[in-house]
Image (cartoon, rainbow, N blue to C red):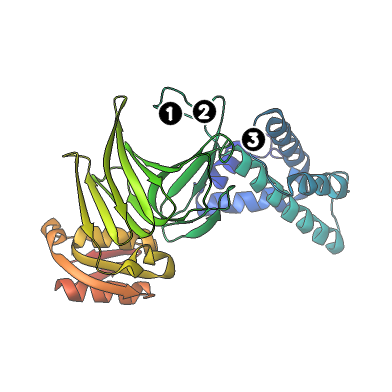
Amino acid sequence: MDSNEIDRQLIRDYLRGNYTASQLNRIKEYLSEARYRESLDKFLLEEWQAITQGMQPEMPGMDAAYQKFQSRYKKAPAPVHRIAQRRLWRYAGVAAMVISALFAARLVRPWLSGRSNPVAAGQWVVFHNEPGKRNKILLPDSSILYLGSAGTIKYNTDYNNTNRRLVLEGEAYFMVKHRGRQPFTVVTGDISTIDIGTEFNIRYYPGQAAVAVAVAKGNVEVRKTNAGNDTRLAAIGQGQQLQYDSLTSQAVVSNLGDTGLVGAWRRGVLSFRKRPLKEVTDELERYYGVSIRYTNAAAGDILITTLLNNTTQKDAINIVTLTAGIHYTREGKTILLR
């Protein structure tokens, strides 16, 4: 590769969160050194053209940001003096913003549906959180969702026009805006949760058998779709929870002791009631972005009950291990349970 050419795949990997410290330094060079400007400009222009030629989600302020980049920086002379260097960093800031916005629009995938009438020629808008990260998302229909750590939510670009269908991997809390035409539906594996005017929490991680749906307000209907067959599992209301086991295809509905704990993780509260230690530490890994390992796998079967209320990572580990009656040590970035 020419020494003045940027590594386009490196930028794509970076925007998907897949990079090393040395690669991050390389990205900074691309955005701050004049010798990469021509290659970076060409890359941005080609990405912009690809966006405008396809069916993509609307990106507010996108045109203005790109025009600002084009008009103010594209023809600017290469910086030599300190004042020019400041201009270059301003260029780098706008270029970084444009790159991020462009790829936000490109992070979509073709609509794949098991239903007989899938949304035609649509594409996905995708939101993903890394471990330790949580965020609040405003949907096109003014519904609000809180997406948990290590979670992914996606919806079709026809959302709020021909459908209100989302696909979730992870945990999310939904505050649904009432609409008359399309039902608000959240798909988790082969389970669909259909809102009937409510606030509810769903927990589903691929690779785990359990799906949990808990209702804070209103009602939901939970259905299972398998091999073209659509089966109603249950309708649950405020203060109720449905737990579905994909291995046994069994669904159990129970009453919750405190509806205030439904989706309480979004307020920094983690509640565990007679949960295996392994499930608890898996949750701590996602919530705090840490790595937890066992010297004895059998310890993961210990049942514990505890409440973590806006607890620091260190205090959370101390409380959980004390409750379980085990010890831990730290080895670098890994917490080792003994």
Side of 15 where 148 appears, left or right: left
Quadrant the N terminus occupies: top right
Q: Distance between the residues labelled 1 and 2?
A: 8 Å
Mark in the foreground, 2 or 3? 2
* Location of mark 1 (residue): 113
Residue 151 spot, x, y in % from top left: 42, 51
Q: Give, as a three-letter code, the residue at label 2.
A: Val
Tell whether 260 sits left or right of 121. left
Kindly state the secondary structure of the residue where label 1 is placed: loop
Q: Mark 3 points at which residue?
A: 56
CA–CA distance in space, label 2 to label 3? 15 Å
Q: What residue type is labelled 3?
A: Gln
Label 2 sits on residue: 119
Give the mark, 3 or 1, whose residue is nearer the N terminus.
Answer: 3
Query: Element at badge 2?
Result: loop
Are there few (<14), some (14-19), or many (20+) residues within 10 Å of tag 1?
Answer: few
Q: Image check: 273 left or right of 69?
A: left
Amino acid type for the residue under numbered disc 1: Ser
